């Protein structure tokens, strides 16, 4: 394990959680969760998942997914992703999932989502807005959004995941202006 070529390259990390690119070794776990690396297709078929990974590593200009890992163990906790929210919106929508329910509520997701948002704002100057659509019943998720500096902007009726009768969702956003102000406040005290 001392081989430098096997060293994990984290894009961001703190003492508990890190985000990094998806690895081929992650694909088995990812295949168990329908929309963990793509919001437009479930990608649970291992061959299709591997083909998509080979094509672009789940990282393009208009969409991408990163692994959330536990720093102490390197264990894959889940994923976070972005994709274009709409042609007239100057930003992206985010998604995230912690795979094992036993890992939820332990603070991993808010840390990873915050790091991911910071990374997107830092690396993509054309992104002026990041947004989350969260079904109204999902209290832990909208509390996570607020903890990460996202502001609730409104209610989107019948916008949830269900096909027959989709539920309502809250729309949350964090803008580049918010990000700059939050960074200046942290630095300036």
Image (cartoon, grey):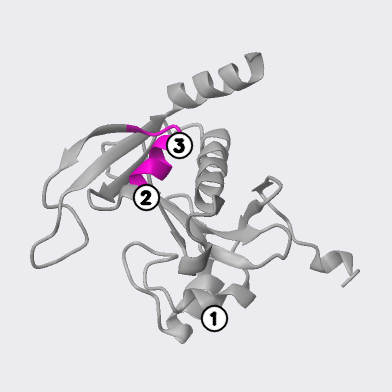
* Crowd rating for badge 1 (residues with CA inside 10 Å; few <14, some 14–19, many 20+): some
Q: Which residues are magenta?
A: 140-151
Q: Where 30 falls versus 17 (above or below)?
A: below
Q: Nearer the viewer, residue 91 or 70?
A: 70
Note whether residue 106 is visible: yes
Residue at 39% x, 64% y: name it: 38
Residue 42 position, x and y percent, is: 34, 73
- Identify the residue position indicated by label 1 in the image: 28
144 in magenta? yes
Which residue is situated farthest in the left direction here?
165
Q: Which residue is mark 2?
A: 140
Question: Pointer 3: what residue?
Answer: 147
The image shows residue 152, relative to residue 100, as above or below, that is above
Q: Disc 2 on helix, strand or loop?
A: helix
Q: Report helix, strand or loop for mark 1.
A: helix
Find residue 34 and report its horizontal and vertical position in percent.
37, 73
Residue 189, how many percent across, how many down? Answer: 63, 15
């Amino acid at each position: 394990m001392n081989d430098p070529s096997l060293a994990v390259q984290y894009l961001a990390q703190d003492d508990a959680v890190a985000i990094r690119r998806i690895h081929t070794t992650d694909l088995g776990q990812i295949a168990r969760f329908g929309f963990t690396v793509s919001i437009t297709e479930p990608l649970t078929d291992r061959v299709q998942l591997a083909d998509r990974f080979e094509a672009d590593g789940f990282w393009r200009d208009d969409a991408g997914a990163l692994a959330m890992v536990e720093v102490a163990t390197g264990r894959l906790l889940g994923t976070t992703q972005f994709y274009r929210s709409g042609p007239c919106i100057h930003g992206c929508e985010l998604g995230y999932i912690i795979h094992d329910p036993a890992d939820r509520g332990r603070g991993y997701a808010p840390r990873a989502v915050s790091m991911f948002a910071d990374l997107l704002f830092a690396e993509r100057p054309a992104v002026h807005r990041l947004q989350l659509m969260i079904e109204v019943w999902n209290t832990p998720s909208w509390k996570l959004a607020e903890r990460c500096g996202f502001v609730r902007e409104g209610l989107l009726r019948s916008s949830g995941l269900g096909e027959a009768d989709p539920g309502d969702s809250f729309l949350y956003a964090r803008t580049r202006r918010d990000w700059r102000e939050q960074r200046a406040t942290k630095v300036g005290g």
